[in-house]
Amino acid sequence: MASFEEKGMSMPVITHQDSEVTITEIKGTPPTDIEQPALDETEEPEFVDGTMRAWAIVFAAFFSQMISMGFCNVYGVFQNHYLNHKFQGRASTFELAWIGSLAIMALDIAGPFTGAICIHFGHRQSALVGVFVMTMSLVAAAYATEVWQLYLTQGILYGLGASLTYFSSLSLPSQWFVRNRGLATGITISGGGIGGLWLSPLISNLLDSKGFQWTMLCCAIAHLVLVTPAVWLFKGRLETGRQRAKRIVQFGYRKGESKEGEKKRKFVDFSIMKDVRFCLLFVAGIFVVSGYFTPFYYINSFAIQHGVDASSAALMVGLMNGASAVGRIVMGLVSDRIGCINALFISTFAASLTVFLVWTFAKTTAIMFVFSILYGLCCGAYLSSTVSVSGAICGLERLASVTGIIYAGMAIGSAIGSPTSGAILDSIGHKTDYMGVIVFAGSVMAIGTVILFLLKFKTSRNMFARV
């Protein structure tokens, strides 16, 4: 048997101190015939772009958004049912608009915190809790008899659960892609549009045939049975906060990490607000979202007011959602080539033009269908491109939390948008004239477009630069 000297090593010295054994290796190199660990925990793991697992996670995220955000996107069908059946003569359009707006507000305003929860506890764990909360909120909503009860259940509680699931699925695909990050994000967020495409006519038929209570209970079961398996596939590539803490205790800090850096970590990091570009993106979100959901919520009642039957009106909502899904995927591809800020500006500009130039003159069923498809195609890319721009500004490590901050700004727009449109319709439009609603939605989106142009100019003064 070879000695330590023959191996080129020095004999280790073993000492006993206070009943503890200390092994000190005195110079020399480890023998080459001893197998080394496969992974050095003090080094960053190797990243492989766009693996099969990565695409599986993208489609799992797509599926979870198809149910959760698809349900949010078809609130216009519920609002029409509440206005003409469940609460007929008992609630105004303004009062009912708050149900859908509260859901979006809760989803958005909880974003910084739910994003931070994803970072600390993991995307799968956060999403599973969100599925449970959404399911319970719909069960409770099924037994609501007053509008304020729907504010709490279908509105706030559902929005909080959806926020956990939404930000988990929204930020996760970016961890697994570099070259096709825009496409992956576009596919993920298109789930809400695809969900709205088939949920709109389905929920309309259920409300007409089975009534409100059974419709809500069916939706609750669908959330639990369909979304749970999808989010179970979620897996983050980056460390969670808990995993990082455990690694540091066991293996110490990696290169570039320090104890001081760990102390500076905050549960919700608002330091990004010091970046002027991020502030412009934040403010633009307030204005754009103030008009963004108005067509989704009001095209149904607008069409019925102009003589379209209920099933065709519900189909318009579905087509708008389906077209938005296509727009998100297409602009995801485009953003990988022309830049995410350019894609964001172009899509928002086109959406505001569609509201002014098409919805204003939509007096026939055919033009209403044309508007539904065009607006969906143009507006859909806003949400997916916003995520890509956030990642470009702040980096992947903080993406979930920073995206949450952006969506918290959008919550302000949600609070302003649909309720204001409802108030305009009730007062100025006398519940029949939608011109004030159209002008309001188009105007606030146009202001948001101008702010996005300033963001593009701040990033690069070259008009044709890829940013």
Image (spheres, helix red, strand yellow):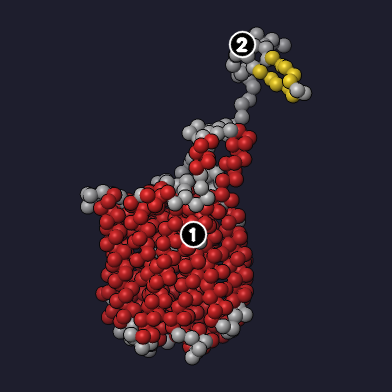
**Farthest residue toward the right?**
19
Residue to which mark 1 is pinned: 111
Q: Disc 1 on helix, strand or loop? A: helix
Circle number at residue 282: none
**Farthest residue toward the top?**
5
Residue 181 vs 432, above or below: the answer is above
Q: Amino acid at mark 2?
A: Gly
Q: Is residue 201 visible?
A: no
Circle 1/circle 2 CB separation < 8 Å: no
Residue 111, image x, y percentages: 49, 59
- How far apart, in angstroms, are the residues tagged by discs 1 and 2? 58 Å
Q: Amino acid at mark 1?
A: Gly
* Horizontal arrangement in the rendering, residue 345 relative to residue 124 (left or right): left
Residue 213 vs 30, above or below: the answer is below
Residue to which mark 2 is pinned: 8
| Quadrant occupied by the N terminus | top right
Q: Nearer the viewer, mark 1 or mark 2?
A: 1
Mark found first going from the N terminus, 1 or 2: 2
Residue at 58% from the left image edge and 54% from the top image edge: 124
Residue at 61% from the left image edge and 60% from the top image edge: 129
